[in-house]
Image (spheres, helix red, strand yellow):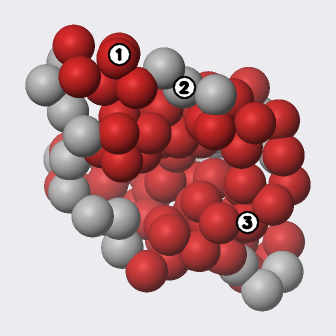
Amino acid sequence: MSQPGENHQRALDRFLAEHPEVITALDGLNPLLAQAKGESQAQYRAERLHEAFEAEAERLGLFAWELTLKLTADSEEAFEAQRVEVHKEVAQMAGLSWIEYCHLHDLAG
């Protein structure tokens, strides 16, 4: 697993600060499970953290990258602006019109 970028790491830190139950679960991981997967405890813990982060994003109806933006943006307005910008870039890369993309991803366009 690659190292998270600076913004993503800040989002993970904030996520953990807001969800102490995740810290408790991570601290209680069985080291034998990491060993069985051929991973270090740190790698295994990082994977479980990312799974919890992605589950929270899904619960909120967001992609994980959107949750990263939400947790690192200075305001809700900044988050929305950044989110739309990235979605527009993805639509362009996919060769979709903005309207098609919004319809496909249930976004307000």
Q: Is residue 8 visible?
A: yes
Q: What residue lies at 82% left-to-right and 35% top-to-bottom? A: 21
Identify residue type, mark 2.
Answer: Leu
Residue at mark 2 = 29
Q: What residue lies at 20% left-to-right and 33% top-to-bottom? A: 39
Q: Is residue 5 left or right of residue 57?
A: left
Q: What residue lies at 34% left-to-right and 17% top-to-bottom? A: 32
Q: Quadrant of residue 70?
A: bottom right
**Residue at the far bottom in the pictured view:** 74
C-alpha gap between disc 1 and disc 3: 26 Å
Identify residue type, mark 1.
Answer: Leu
Q: Is residue 38 left or right of residue 18?
A: left
Mark 3 element type = helix
x and y percent of residue 82 in the render?
58, 74
Eye-nearest disc, 1 or 3: 1
x and y percent of residue 66 in the render?
58, 54
Q: Is residue 63 visible?
A: no
**How many numbered badges does the structure rendering display?**
3
Residue at mark 3 = 14
